[in-house]
Image (cartoon, rainbow, N blue to C red):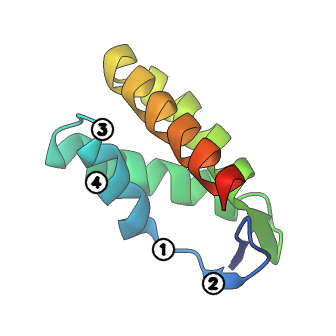
Amino acid sequence: MKVIKRNGELEDFEEGKVARVVHAAGLSEEQAQQLGQNVSQRIKALNAQQVTTIQIRDVVIEEMNKIDKYATDMFIWYQKGKDERQKKT
């Protein structure tokens, strides 16, 4: 499955990338791995050839809220900052 990035580029969906990002947001390594698997299953269940980073982000937020609300808030804060930085370029 391909991911449509904000700049329009395509890249392969990587479960490990999801796990790394949520681990950095505050989940334990074990929680991050499990969340990565859950997100991967949900994204693959869409049966789409391509998904956007926004679709993935929404699923990540839903899954993170089930585990750790504070880490979810940190993830959202990071993503908003990332959005603002990209608008400036």
Q: Secondary structure at mark 3?
A: loop
Residue located at (73% from left, 82% from top): 9
Where residue 80 appears, as percent x and y from the top left, is 57, 35
Whether the residues at callouts 2 and 1 have beta carbons within 8 Å, the answer is: yes
Where residue 60 appears, as percent x and y from the top left, is 53, 41
Disc nearest the viewer among 3 and 4:
3
- Please state, as top left, top right, bottom left or bottom right, where the N terminus lies in the image: bottom right
Q: Amino acid at mark 3?
A: Ala
Spatial CA span between label 3 and label 4: 13 Å
Disc nearest the viewer among 2 and 1:
2
Tell me the residue that label 3 is attached to: 25
Q: Amino acid at mark 2?
A: Glu
Disc nearest the viewer among 1 and 3:
3
Q: Amino acid at mark 4?
A: Gln
Spatial CA span between label 1 and label 3: 17 Å
Spatial CA span between label 2 and label 1: 9 Å
Residue count near mark 1 (Cα–Cα under 10 Å), binned few <14, some 14–19, many ≥20? few
Q: Is residue 49 left or right of residue 75?
A: right
In terms of image quadrants, where is residue 46? Answer: bottom right
Whether the residues at callouts 2 and 4 have beta carbons within 8 Å, the answer is: no
Dot label at residue 11 = 2
